[in-house]
Amino acid sequence: MQLFSCPFCGPRDETEFHFGAEAGNVRPEPAASTSAEAWADYLHFETNPKGPSREIWVHTTCGEFFLMERDTVTHEVKGSQSLRRGEA
Amino acid sequence: MTRRYSAFGLLREGLRGHTGWQPAWRMPDPKPAYDAVIIGGGGQGLATAYYLAKNHGMTRVAVIEKGWLGGGNTGRNTSTIRSNYFYPESVALYDFSLRLYEGLGRELNYNIMLSQRGLVSVANSDAEMEIAARTVNAMQINGVDGELLGAEQVIEKAPLLNTTDRARFPIYGGTWQGRAGVARHDAVAWGYARAADGFGVDIIQNCEVTGFLVENGRCVGVETSRGTIRAGAVGLATAGQSSVLAAKAGFKLPIRSFALQAMVSEPVKPCLDTVVLYPGTGTYLFQSDKGEIVVGGGLDRVLSYGHRGNPPMQTQVLSGLLEMFPSFGQLRLMRQWAGIVDVVPDSSPIIGPSPLPGLYLDCGWGTGGFKAIPAGGYLLAHLISTGQHHEISRPFDLDRFASGRLIDEAAGSGIPH
């Protein structure tokens, strides 16, 4: 069983967490002048890195989204960070 | 020259103490240039090479594999073959594959041990029975054999199923595809490898692609751990590595990689002669020819390139198994493993030209690539040889993500794959 660290609740069982998205995927704005290709790139296309990865997760029990850095090969968790303004 | 396998040959070798067998394929060094290079020596890549030679007369072809032949997901899957899909595009693809499988052993002169023992997907409520009826209707409209079974018929197919009053997932009925079944996964890879080698295709193992050779904006070959190899066209038939190679070619794919695990029990006497799936528990199983109960389920919850499974999904799959077949609680597990599957948002594969001209994609098969090996190889070979889509592969082009014309089978057929 893996332990992930919620910045608010501390280390918890992995089953309490849900993967959100890759970090750094910024929604293109304004929507009206965004091409279908750019929108598809934002919506579907992924870096899907092998090795170090920065990901947005949600801790389903407390409801907070946060940034987690981990390694997709070794499964090592390097750290978690709040996404609240002024804290990240 | 590939020697033909036959019952007579087996008898002759038996009498001679098996001293006359020849290696089924060569172990050549890479040549400086080929007409086509296929990245990935799994079932899909080897099938591509075979159909390039057989259907299109292209024999100056190399298959490049970073590990050993069939050692990725071809050797790690649970070998189920079926075409019980919902959308016409998917049925055209997977039933084409199933039809190719039905003649494959004879065509390749290699026993792939195809066993069309049928697959029952069990409905556990009235609502699921309605969905089952809808699935069967879709299958029949699409010209695939599908049947709606009642509870009695399901229990007849698999008498050891949990039929007690206390069952958490009671049996209401289910869908049945009689032509579905299993095949020997290694044999599929080996059969295609031997047949492709017989046409003169070079299968190069222990050779990792480290980059792409690009001239005037076109892919004209690959850089590998064993030197540069030029190619008229390059095909990408990888799993668990597609995003990494796409990054080397300078583009992204709509893929997330997850571990998918499977397990087998100790071998027991024949007790289950069909493939059984409960969408409710997410667990499916069959009994292998060796007698082992082969069990699989859903994806691990965490994106991963580590070839191992996490305990939470193991727990879920095995608790599902015990709910479905309480008597299997006596069995001991013998092995557990995982493969890395490339999951696409609509659970359908990506077949078509890549953003880099000269490089063609056959990837993103998620958890269902084994059943599609003949079709994937056939369609990628068509693309590489003609530069054009086959009508079956057209809907699976990468352009569907921008056009929005997704083929969402996870929602359509309700079967994770």
Image (cartoon, helix red, strand yellow):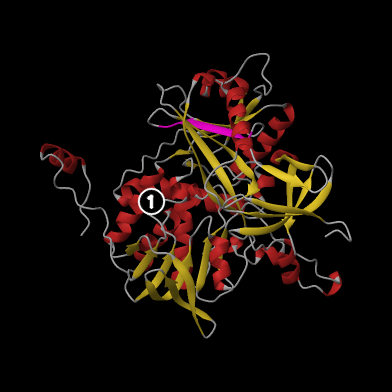
In this orientation, which residue lies closer to the viewer: B245 or B192? B245
**Residue A77 visible here:** yes
Q: Is residue A54 left or right of residue B331?
A: right
Q: Is residue B64 above or below residue A56?
A: below
Q: Is B262 a magenta residue?
A: no
Q: Which residues are magenta?
A: B282-288
Classified by dominant secondary structure, the portion drawn in magenta counts as: strand
Residue B284 falls left or right of residue B123: left
Towards the viewer: B391 or B357: B357
Look at 45% across and 58% down and name the residue there: B377
Quarter of the image containing the C terminus of chain B? top right
Disc 1 designates what residue? Answer: B189
Whether residue A25 sits left or right of residue B330 in the image: it is right
Can residue B393 be seen in this snapshot? Answer: no
Q: Residues within 10 Å of mark 1 (few under 14, many from 20)?
A: many
Residue B123: where, in percent of width, then height? 66, 29
